[in-house]
Image (cartoon, rainbow, N blue to C red):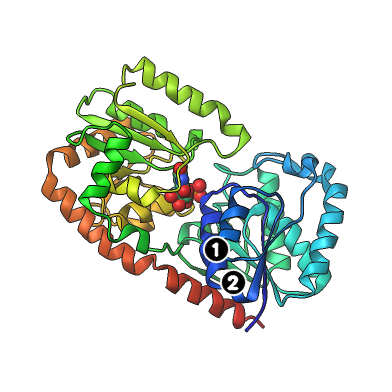
Amino acid sequence: MKRILFLDHTSALGGGELCLLTIAEGLRDRSEVVLFEDGPFATRLRASGVSVDIIELSQKVHGIGRSSGLLADLAATPALFGQILRIARKARRYDVVYVNSQKAMVVGTIAGFLARKPVVWHLHDLLEQSHFSRAHIRISVTLGNRLTRYIIANSEASLAAFREAGGRAERISVVYNGINARPFDDLTSADRRDVRQALAIPDTAFLVGCFSRLADWKGQHVLLEAARNEPEIHVLLVGEALFAADASYGVMLRALSQRYGMDDRVHFVGFRDDIPELMFACDAVVHTSTAPEPFGRVIAEGMLANRPVIATRAGGAVELIDDKVTGLLVPPSDATALRGALVTLLRQPDLRNRLAEKGHQTARQKFASDEMIRRVGEIIDALP
Ligand code: UDP
């Protein structure tokens, strides 16, 4: 069995990091995770018994954003070099370098090359201009083509965007995020009541939850607009801005809720670790991203929580939900369509149950965490 050095640049708990948490936990006996900063992700990994090492990036490199151009990337190059060498030294003790984020990919492919170790890239992003600058896409695709041995894409949509951007890798396959279903099972109506009581949300309210970090493209403003004239609907906003660039969006959302006169039925609860319980306390789970979602863990989690899910029809979401069978799809940025879907669910409890049940069955099969860990382990062990 091959030994794996996992790399991720951030210690914020985004979807890619939560996916790696499950994989690293499953393969912890033969791996170590290197992060470029300490923080909540490192804490969660350590609590799961995973070995973690922090090799810090210089501030210059941290400052590079998804939309930065080539110049910013080049300016940070000397600062990167020392870090790459440290990782290359560490990589000699492992058989495979596994890169899990864009910045980790840049550092890890070069470190892997220097240490003569194969690199596996877990692609959690849609390499499109709705998410990245042209220069970043070019760098990612070039490194992906030249310096990776295998690419694991988190959806057909991410794989297609990589190909569209010039990705030529032959060893590439789609592995959906696997999510541990256990915390979603065994929740009872008493848990639901407790959560609602703690949040001061009436038992009778029709509660719609959105579980994404606060960022403009995650589209929580569309949900507020959709629920604005529907006084029976309460909105639960779970999540915080994870990255500095998104800090003002939460302020804007709170102002919007006030302007729409919805403060008594919009509940901001910040970043939470008890997602299964919170989803179970909702009557529907809504995904509102205005740009194509690479995968959309929150959609799969809503299905596992046995709740009807509404998601926007773009990117990976389309692979997760079969419209009107395992959930509902609405066009992105369309508050009128979202309002229609919400009102349909509000009025039709039978439909809610049917969608939730079918969604739950599908998610148990398609997003099983054991299966994801098995497939990733198999890909790694079969590397030439
Ligand atoms: N999440 C969480 N706490 C929160 C909000 C979100 O743990 O307060 C989790 C959520 O359950 C999901 C992940 O963050 O597992 C977000 O992943 P997704 O693929 O939906 O979006 P990303 O953050 O990767 O863009």
> In this orientation, does residue 13 appear?
yes
Whether tag 2 and tag 1 are in contact, CB under 8 A, the answer is yes
Q: Is 275 placed above or below 229 here?
A: below
Observer able to see residue 315: no
Type of residue at label 2?
Arg
Residue 374 placement (x, y as % from top left):
49, 76
Residue 28 has which mark?
2
Element type at mark 2: helix
Could you say where residue 360 lies in the image, as x and y percent from the top left? 27, 60
The type of residue carrying mark 1 is: Ser
The x and y percentages for residue 304 are: 32, 58
Residue 75 figure quarter? top right
* Earlier-in-chain disc, 2 versus 1: 2
The answer to whether 299 appears left or right of 51 in the picture is: left
Which label number is shown at residue 48? 1
Residue 317: x and y in percent read 39, 52
For the N terminus, the quadrant is: bottom right
Q: Nearer the viewer, residue 58 or 37?
A: 37
Q: Quadrant of the C terminus?
A: bottom right
Q: What residue is drawn where x is 61% and y is 65%?
A: 50
The residue tagged with tag 1: helix, strand or loop?
A: loop
